[in-house]
């Protein structure tokens, strides 16, 4: 089987596929004023998604993460999961969600073929969670996480964006949360995007702060799996759960890049903060375009840069993370 490899020897078994730009939360670091529809053409439909995933599977990808916006807003999400799960070569199907619909929808998604779950939860304190996200929905999210454990999902991860002055003193509480729960919590360093420059200046905190606290408390770095996401995972013998740290401003962050992104409108993004998108949608309309689609993907991968330009304040095409799925 062909393996997608770029000019720096990095392999790409992992695709992050956005299903929608819409989101029903108003997170302060992403969409503080809520999602505003722009009236442009609709997002990829199920058949377009399947043609896209088949192409990437042919090129050696075996892990698909469905993102947004908020992917659970797609009424056809269960159908999408089932169709993607039926693509030969796809072994892992994950979703990143705010978790509000988990109690109602997760069993159906799981039956359809969902294998991994990431839930955004920026604070363990209900009032802080409400302040950051604009919604007081933490109880049902925690209910959904418990349901995922009951269903025996192979991977359950919680994502917390690290925010100076808002949630940066919660590491001890998270450690206590993980003592008896076999889940992973990942602290994500706040990234500057096109729309959040002032917010970034106020609330950015280097992920090194969390790493130093983890090491001091006896947590140790776990070896990284080949198809893992960008987190560096830490474990502790007294805790069933683990803690991941995603540090996009770390010097070697981009060396381990193993994922490509496709937007909800069908543009290939070689980097979360890249300066251009490659339109794939015109080649997703007919099976006859399969060879041209494969050629476009492999040719464009040769343009992938060694790293992002975040250190120079270059945020590329990304106005906010909801626009591409993080």
Image (cartoon, rainbow, N blue to C red):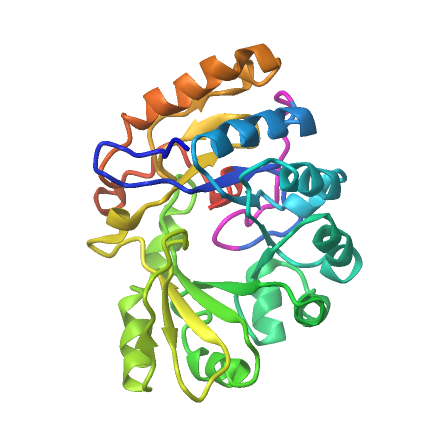
Decide whether residue 26 is among the magenta residues: no
Residue 319 pos. (x, y %): 44, 37
Residue under the image location 40 percent in, 24 percent down: 297
Q: How many marks?
A: 0
Q: Is residue 151 left or right of residue 252?
A: right
Q: Residue at x 53, y 64 (%)?
A: 157
Residue that sits furthest to the right in the current view: 104
Q: Residue furthest top?
A: 288
Front-most of 19 and 190? 19
Residue at screen point 27% across, 47% down:
254
Displayed quadrant of residue 244:
bottom left
Give the percent coordinates (x, y) of residue 291.
47, 15
Q: Nearer the viewer, residue 139 or 48?
A: 48
Residue nearest the viewer, comparing 75 with 191 = 75
Q: Is residue 59 found left or right of 20 in the rendered image?
A: left
Look at the picture and state if 293 lies above or below 130: above
**Which part of the image, by quadrant, shows the N terminus?**
top left
- Indicate the position of residue 142 as horizontal and vertical percent values: 67, 71
Q: Is residue 148 visible?
A: yes
Q: Position of residue 286 (x, y in %)?
A: 61, 13
For residue 33: magenta? Answer: yes
Point out the stretch of residues depicted in magenta: 28-41
The residue sitting at the bottom extreme is 238
């Amino acid at each position: 089987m062909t393996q997608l490899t770029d000019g720096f020897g990095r392999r790409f078994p992992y695709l992050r596929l956005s299903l929608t730009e819409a989101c029903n939360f108003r997170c302060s670091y992403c969409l503080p004023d809520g999602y505003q529809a722009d009236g442009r053409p609709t997002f990829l439909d199920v058949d377009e998604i399947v043609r896209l995933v088949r192409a990437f599977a042919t090129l050696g990808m075996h892990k698909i993460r469905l993102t947004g916006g908020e992917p659970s807003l797609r009424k056809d999400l269960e159908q999408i999961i089932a169709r993607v799960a039926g693509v030969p070569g796809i072994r892992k199907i994950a979703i990143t969600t705010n978790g509000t619909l988990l109690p109602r929808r997760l069993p159906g998604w799981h039956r359809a073929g969902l294998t991994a779950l990431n839930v955004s939860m920026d604070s363990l304190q209900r009032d802080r969670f409400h302040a950051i996200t604009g919604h007081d929905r933490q109880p049902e999210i925690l209910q959904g996480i418990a349901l995922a454990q009951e269903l025996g999902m192979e991977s359950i991860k919680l994502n917390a964006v690290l925010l100076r002055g808002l949630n940066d003193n919660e590491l001890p509480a998270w450690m206590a949360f993980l003592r008896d729960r076999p889940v992973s919590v990942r602290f994500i360093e706040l990234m500057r995007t096109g729309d959040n420059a002032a917010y970034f200046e106020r609330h950015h905190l280097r992920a090194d702060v969390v790493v130093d606290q983890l090491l001091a408390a006896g947590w140790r770095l776990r070896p990284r799996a080949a198809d893992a996401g960008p987190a560096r995972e830490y474990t502790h013998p007294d805790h069933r759960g683990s803690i991941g740290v995603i540090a996009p401003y770390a010097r070697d962050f981009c060396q381990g890049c193993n994922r490509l992104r496709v937007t909800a409108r069908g543009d290939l993004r070689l980097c979360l903060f890249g300066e251009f998108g490659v339109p794939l949608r015109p080649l997703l309309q007919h099976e006859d375009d399969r060879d041209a689609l494969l050629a476009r993907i492999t040719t464009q991968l040769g343009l992938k840069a060694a790293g992002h330009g975040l250190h120079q304040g270059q945020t590329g095409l990304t106005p906010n993370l909801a626009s591409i799925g993080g």
